[in-house]
Amino acid sequence: MREVELLVVGAGPAGLGAAIEASRYGVKVLLVDDKDKPGGQLFKQIHKFFGSKEHLAGTRGFDIGLHLLKEADSQGVEISLQTKVLGIMEKGIISLLVEEKEMKLLKAKRIVLATGGVEKALSFPGWTLPGVMSAGAAQTLINIERVLPGERILMVGSGNVGLIISYQLLQAGADVVGIVEAAPSITGYLVHAGKVMRAGIPIYTSHTIKEVRGKKSVEEAVITTLDKRWNIIEGTEKTVSADTVCISVGLNPNGQLASLAGCEFKFFPELGGFLPLHDDNMESTKKGIYIAGDLSGIEEANSALDEGRLAGISVAASLGYIDSNRFAKLKEDYWDRLNKLRGGPFGYKRSIAKKRILLSSQQKEMRDQERDCIELEENTKLKNYKSIPSLKEFQEFPGYPSLSRIKKGAVACIECIQEIPCDPCVAACPFKAININPYITDLPYLDENKCKGCGVCIASCPGQAIFVLNYNYSSEKAAISFPYEYLPYPKIGGKAVGVNRKGEPVAEVEIVKVDKRANFDKTTVITIACDKKCINQIRFIERIKDDA
Amino acid sequence: MPKDNEKNSIKKIICRCEEITEEEIREAIREGYTTIKSIKRRTRAGMGLCQGRTCSTLIRDIIAEMTGDKKEDILSDTVRPPLYPVELGVLGKKNK
């Protein structure tokens, strides 16, 4: 029987991170994945990622995937694809099914489980009709298979996954007829919501999907309003014509293999439900079995990658490849990075749940008092939005230039008003006019006197929340620049309908510049000329739907 | 187009692999089967190809709603190998 030092199960960001780091320090690693390509969900992610420089923020997800595969290759990680782990048996014997046709038995000194998450289902009459699918399935169709799941899509769930995939469905050429959200406010990042709202997509908060109807496949969906206790208010039914309904209501950790291996589980609703406990080395309650990524709590790709890397160095240290001093230093760095990613109002619940996991693994309960303090401190920053805020609200934030500065000429206008872990705009600015400090979750501050309005920051922002306003474009006209990621591009000299932050038409505008420079990485920057009075209203144009 | 909501909710499938409806799950809970494991044995929900990957969360929600039990107290079913379907011929083939 073959024996390896480390078996990593799952070649997504967490598994790749673990395999690469363990290999870097000399561990012989076998990485297996049930799919025919490595990368997990990374190659479906065509948007620019949030985060900091060490997380390659501002890079598109699939490029991060390619980067990791190259690293795995250069570190000599052995990857076995179409390889399913059927079980972890007595005496630690692992059974593998390779390409559906061959069984292999294996022993491993250490195992890292990075089996990811499973999308949650939502049941309603008609949910088994063809045309109802998980949002992740729709994303696979458009970004991997390059097939549109339908033409008129209703998205259920306004978390980041629902918002991002809605945006990508628009990019792929579908119509998104609306986004339904049961909570009273948008649950994902406002900047992601901003992208789809600018494109004219309505977000129905305090709404749920009641039923989907159709003879052979989806023809229409019935949505209804919810009261404060999340009960359906009778008589509020609205029928929406749609051929596809995408469900994006969160994920569960995929814990089947961990359960089979004998790891102890506990329920953490903030992190997706039941998940295996782990200590600060990412080791589960079963000695020698480590976990990372969505399995250890549903988060996002950067956290998964860093948790994987942490698991990788922990394995290397436990096998004697890293001395304890060096390991302690590396471990501290990774925890520092992870804590940063979990900072801010969006991360605080996950951050507390993670602390409880560590305490649970040490058989300690977190004192309520301690928890309340953290909650109170972080919760004060949390502000929920039902829709895009008003101009007045935006103007209160440190990225919005003053009216007097706007009148002086070209200046950046940063409409980033939630504390999320992201800072590529800081490095993008050649004049050091944007600052985010001391924490990566702090809001970007615009030093309006240093800003020259060059617009390099526009394409750097993964949230597409930066614009350039030029009040003095000509004696009558102002110019507004914004990011645009749809095909076909508008033509210079052509007319378009300028729209506001909610996608509502404001005025006819002229396209004056279409900047496709290579280092914008396919985020085109469009500049339009409009009436000076529209400078604080217009933020986008109605999308050009075909080459006509 | 079906308009009868009542009829539709009765037909609402929870376990797609074994085609078990919500009403069958609710009936089992009324009979006293209030764990994911016992509901599986009573109705076959979760016994199909996906081994409850999709429906167990939905079943947990229904149990919680009907019994008032906390979700964290409604345990998942025991996981057993093989985690994926394997052809018997492959399983029985002698290892080289």
Image (cartoon, rainbow, N blue to C red):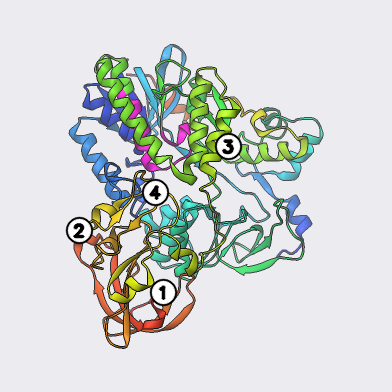
Identify the mark nearer the N-term, 1 or 2.
2
Q: CA distance from mark 4 to mark 2?
A: 20 Å
Magenta span dominant secondary structure: helix
Instruction: Tell me the quarter of the picture where residue A281 sits.
Output: top left
- Residue A187 lies left or right of residue A104; in this view the side is right
Q: Residue at x 46, y 17 (%)?
A: A286
Residue nearest the viewer, comparing B93 with A131 = A131
Give the number of the disc on residue A269: 3
Residue A350 in the image, given as x and y percentages of width and height = 50, 37
Is A432 located above or below residue A13 in the figure? below
Residue A77 in the image, given as x and y percentages of width and height = 24, 30
Tell me the residue that label 4 is attached to.
A442
Tell me the residue that label 2 is attached to.
A430
Quarter placement of the C terminus of chain A: bottom left
Residue A451 in the image, given as x and y percentages of width and height = 26, 64
Residue nearest the viewer, comparing A348 with A235 = A348
Give the number of the disc on residue A536: 1
Density class for disc 4 (Cα within 10 Å; few <14, some 14-19, many ≥20) is some
In the image, is residue A301 part of the stretch drawn in magenta? yes
Identify the mark nearer the N-term, 1 or 3.
3
